[in-house]
Image: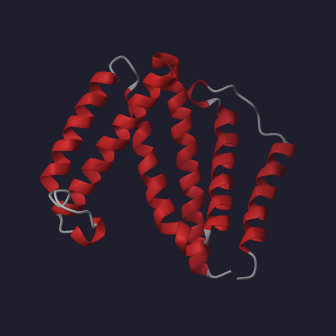
């Protein structure tokens, strides 16, 4: 396995970890706002975060990285949309712990990683690495009972499951 592949696989594992953290945070919002309200708050954070990211990239001259048609070539359009979505997020999230409101923004690195890493290592290896990141992170979050999740200790069988997940990524990667 090439060293560059290991780096890309680690990005995919990280993407899976971020995705699991997003779902755990979403659980915290759901207890306050229900499933639809939690989804709305998450979407506002996704849209606001992505708009601000695109606006920032365009502002520093990254037009070649964005490649969207007009009118989506202007930083100020994304800055305005970002301000609108973040304002809506703040209003919708009143009374909720502020750290929970970032949940939707966590979809951004997950999606960027999918667009960047998936084509480099192949869909099978990418998804195996994402699932490894998701399940490994969920075992850790369960261990500490994070965000109101039911606490469930890591025992030898669960630890073996994580090892098998990592072995699965190696096996799916193959010799290529």
Please name the residue shown 47% across and 24% down the image.
36
Q: Position of residue 127 (x, y in %)?
A: 64, 59
Q: Position of residue 156 (x, y in %)?
A: 86, 44
Q: Looking at the image, can residue 99 be seen?
A: no
Quarter-of-image position of residue 20: top right
Q: Position of residue 107 (x, y in %)?
A: 45, 47
Quarter-of-image position of residue 157: top right
The answer to whether residue 102 is above or below residue 30 is: below
Q: Position of residue 122 (x, y in %)?
A: 61, 71
How did the renderer colour the structure?
secondary structure
Please name the residue shown 75% across and 81% down the image.
175
Left or right: where does residue 127 sit relative to residue 82? Answer: right
Please name the residue shown 47% across and 63% down the image.
115
- Counting labels gives 0
- Quadrant the C terminus occupies: bottom right
Left or right: where does residue 51 sit relative to residue 29? Answer: left
The answer to whether residue 142 is above or below residue 52 is: above
- Quadrant the N terminus occupies: bottom right
Please name the residue shown 22% across and 68% down the image.
63
Residue that extends furthest to the right in the rendered view of this protein? 157
Q: Looking at the image, can residue 124 be seen?
A: yes
């Amino acid at each position: 396995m090439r060293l560059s592949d290991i780096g890309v696989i680690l990005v995919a594992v990280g993407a899976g970890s971020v995705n699991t953290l997003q779902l755990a945070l979403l659980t915290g919002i759901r207890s306050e706002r229900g499933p639809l309200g939690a989804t709305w708050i998450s979407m506002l954070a996704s849209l606001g975060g992505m708009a601000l990211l695109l606006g920032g990239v365009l502002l520093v001259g990254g037009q070649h990285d964005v490649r969207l048609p007009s009118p989506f070539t202007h930083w100020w359009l994304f800055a305005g949309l970002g301000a609108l979505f973040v304002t809506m997020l703040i209003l919708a999230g009143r009374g909720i712990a502020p750290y929970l409101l970032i949940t939707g923004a966590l979809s951004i690195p997950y999606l960027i990683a999918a667009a960047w890493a998936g084509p480099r290592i192949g869909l099978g290896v990418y998804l195996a690495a994402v699932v490894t990141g998701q399940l490994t992170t969920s075992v850790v979050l369960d261990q500490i009972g994070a965000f109101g999740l039911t606490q469930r200790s890591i025992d030898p069988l669960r630890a073996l499951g994580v090892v098998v997940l990592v072995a699965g990524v190696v096996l799916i990667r193959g010799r290529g």
